[in-house]
Image (cartoon, coloured by chain):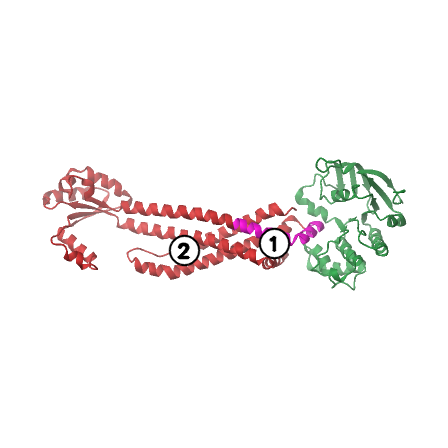
Amino acid sequence: MAINVGYFIKESVTSFRRNWVMSLGAVITIYLSLLLVGLSMVTGYLVSEVVKSVEDKVSIQIFLKDGAATADVEALQGWLLRDELVEAVNYVSKEQALERFKEEMAGSPEIIDSMRENPLPASLDVTLNDPRTVQEMVERIKAQELFVQVCDRPDDPEQSLKYGQQIVDRLFAFTRIVRLVGVVFVAMLASVSLIFINNTIRLAIYARRKEIGIMRLVGASNSFIRAPFLLEGVLQSLLGAGIAILTIVAIQAAVLPRLQEALPFLPVDVSTAAMLQLSAVLLGAGILIGLLGSGFALRRYLKV
Amino acid sequence: MITMRKVGKTYGTDKPALHDVDVDIEQGEFVFLVGHSGSGKSTFIRLLQRELLPSRGQIVVAGQDIVKLKNWKVPYLRRNIGCVFQDFKLLPNKTSYENVAFALEVIGRSKHVIRTQVPEVLRLVGLEDKMESYPDELSGGEQQRVSIARAFVNRPPILLADEPTGNLDPATSLGIMSLFNRINKTGTTVLVATHDREMVDSMRKRVIALENGYVVRDQHRGVYGYGD
């Protein structure tokens, strides 16, 4: 019934205007829930990008005690280089460590001034071929006798190792919480939007009950009677989804550059492809909510 | 055209509204369905429209067993049955023309069909001058003519009328009945439920009388009844 598309759209828009307070309520709740979905998706995306970049930088630092025998250190270095997990080993002397520290702390000279002697240990920086093998490599190092001999804290060798696993774990825990909270909120808001759409469509059915009665009387097919109401629900949620997408784009344009400024060492950026994917998800979710909400209303209130 | 076999209808646990109804109505017949309020007239009509399903028995309308008819096919059955009611059921925000056209629009008829058939049927019911009038600008009789035009515009083989003159004065009722008669002359089967005694007696058509859910009389060239 291609000729009737115009009729359906006209009917839906008329009904939307006749009932604009409820319709607006439905649009706003859908907008809010989809906005939250979108924001938690963006956050998740950013965090996983950060995790990736941190993983790239993951290395294991082995702190050496002052006055460790050069032969032992070189032997440990040689042993590390022979390991197939290791990409490179870099020796950092006490002086180099202090230089680095001074560079990093250039903003607060009082700390540097307060240091009377060099408290920093020398270290071996181990870069790995694959960041996911950090934990495995740490275990191997701990089992190595040479390491215990030269390490900074022979009483507790664990303390002489510093590696990114903790950071990565913490980031993942954070993402998990963000996701969980997001899912709970989104589920709540989605049910509210469903109820709202359900109600608007119920009112729309009520407002048009005479016409519906006559349509049934003269033999309009069930799908013909239902289509305008389904379309109305979908229009409402598409409107909500559209505004949500625009808001997220605006937020991205306004907030991300400042975030990037504040965190120059992290890659804070959302690619166009990711944005397109996000928009598609939001539109899809909107259509789904609209269809479900008006579908429920039709099943309950429209007997054909 | 209409066949009912051993049809019974019970609402809830109450006593039955219809009992063992056996009726055959041939194509092109004009039939009055008479009886007091509560005798089962409306149930009879609503069973034929498949607004209701019978508790027992078989109903065949326009060649289809409507008890076994699938739900999604019901609209197509209803396109074969024009319906007229006591309260006209017109849409107040549409003109006569639009009210009639609506019936064709919603079953997907083309604009061309609508533009030719609607004026034609409005002429048939004698409302060619009132096409652009809204229902509240029309008299009761004129409104009922619009509703008959709407029921007949799709040229259904069956026309059902439930108390079509219940809200109208005798003179106007006469005009409505002669309109039904004209429609019947085109070969349409017409079934009119009424308790308008004068009308039934003057028309001398087939009369089916219902009482407490039973068919108590089925008489050709009949009258309303005796003494009641």
Q: Is residue B110 above or below residue B189?
A: below
Tell me the amino acid under the disc marked 1.
Answer: Pro
Magenta-drawn stretch, dominant element (helix, strand or loop): helix
**Which chain gets the green colouring?**
B
The residue sitting at 15% across, 54% down in the picture is: A98
Membership of A218 in magenta stretch: yes
> Is residue A119 found left or right of B217 in the rendered image?
left
In-front residue for pair A277/A83: A277
In the picture of the structure, the residue carrying the numbered disc 1 is: A228
Count of marks placed on residues: 2
For disc 1, the chain is: A
Q: Looking at the rendering, which quadrant does residue A161 occupy?
A: top left
Q: Bounds of the magenta span?
A: A193-219
- Position in image of residue A248 (x %, y %): 43, 57
**Which chain gets the red colouring?**
A
Q: Secondary structure at mark 2?
A: helix
In the picture of the structure, the residue carrying the numbered disc 2 is: A273
